[in-house]
Image: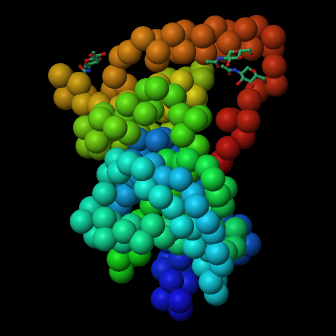
Amino acid sequence: MKADVLVLATLATLCSILVYTDACSCMLSHPQQHYCNSDFVILARVKRERIHADSRIYKVRVRREYKISEKGTLALKSGRLITAVWDSMCGTRLQPGKLYVLSGRIFSLKAYINLCNMAVEWDTLTRRQRKGLKLMYKHGCSCQIKRCLATEQRCPRHVDSCNWGNDCETKEGICMRQANNSCMWTRNRALAKCTKEWRKNLTANASHKREPTLLYHLP
Ligand SMILES: *[C@@H]1O[C@H](CO)[C@@H](O)[C@H](O)[C@H]1NC(C)=O
Ligand SMILES: *[C@@H]1O[C@H](CO)[C@@H](O)[C@H](O)[C@H]1NC(C)=O
Ligand SMILES: *[C@@H]1O[C@H](CO)[C@@H](O)[C@H](O)[C@H]1NC(C)=O
């Protein structure tokens, strides 16, 4: 299991933007980014977990494969997902019995998951996110998704990316190259409705003269 520890450590470093000595930190990712940047994305029910040396090993039953390579198929035949035991090394925790959408990486024919990957309970996904996983995210992988929370000034537009500024885009957004070659959130009713409500909330918040939001304190 020494090799696993090494891989886990490497993964933990790769996924951290700031490397703390005692904490794992991940850049927040949109579900479409998880989809595009992972070796595998699956729907799986967690059966059991056990600890072996520095690894926590989850035994899962794979219910659906949204994205997987040939190596991934081999690795996942065992139904084993490996993660670090320690939070500080980005070890992730799953609950036996629950059904998750999980993303991760394959190294040496083993499947690894960590805190920076996607591990979302199936029940909490929106219809649009399920459709994205099943059909649409894969068509958007040539587009970047850029976190952009500025609420007063506009975020600069780029042809090759969508600006990700609110929760509506997380829940209902699928970033795709449009007919004119620009990447944009694909229009749909759920996104329009959510965005309208979000704008209304924003206006209401502004008129209450709240403290400037935390956004502006970020480095
Ligand atoms: C591309 O088309 C969308 C509408 O689908 C429009 O909103 C956007 O401004 C266009 N982008 C460019 C660069 O022309
Ligand atoms: C708008 O505000 C309401 C009440 O706080 C909240 O329940 C709802 O989720 C908000 N909607 C959005 C899109 O932020
Ligand atoms: C409005 O303020 C509430 C409470 O501070 C916050 O949770 C919510 O995200 C804000 N909504 C918007 C759209 O900024």
Q: How many marks?
A: 0
- Please give left or right for residue 6 compared with residue 217 in the image: left
* Residue occupying image coordinates x 37% and y 34%: 132
Identify the residue shown where x is 24% and y is 65%. 70
Q: Quadrant of residue 52?
A: bottom right
The image quarter containing residue 111 is: bottom left
* 145 sits left or right of 48 in the view: left
State the image coordinates of residue 116 (x, y, percent, origin top left).
55, 57
Residue 70 appears in the figure? yes
Q: Residue at x 30, y 34 (%)?
A: 136
Q: Residue at 55% across / 78% down in the picture? A: 9
In the image, residue 64 above or below residue 83 = above
Residue 134 in the image: state x and y as whole percent.
Answer: 34, 38
Q: Is residue 165 visible?
A: no
Observer-nearest of 185 and 126: 126
Q: Ligand 1 lies in which image quarter?
A: top left
Looking at the image, is 38 positioned above or below residue 176? below
Q: How is the image coloured?
A: rainbow
Foreground pick, 107 / 214: 107
User: Against 72, is 206 above or below?
Assistant: above
Residue 5 to residue 175: above or below: below
Q: Position of residue 183 (x, y in %)?
A: 29, 30
Q: Nearer the viewer, residue 188 or 148?
A: 188
Rendered location of residue 86, percent (x, y): 69, 73
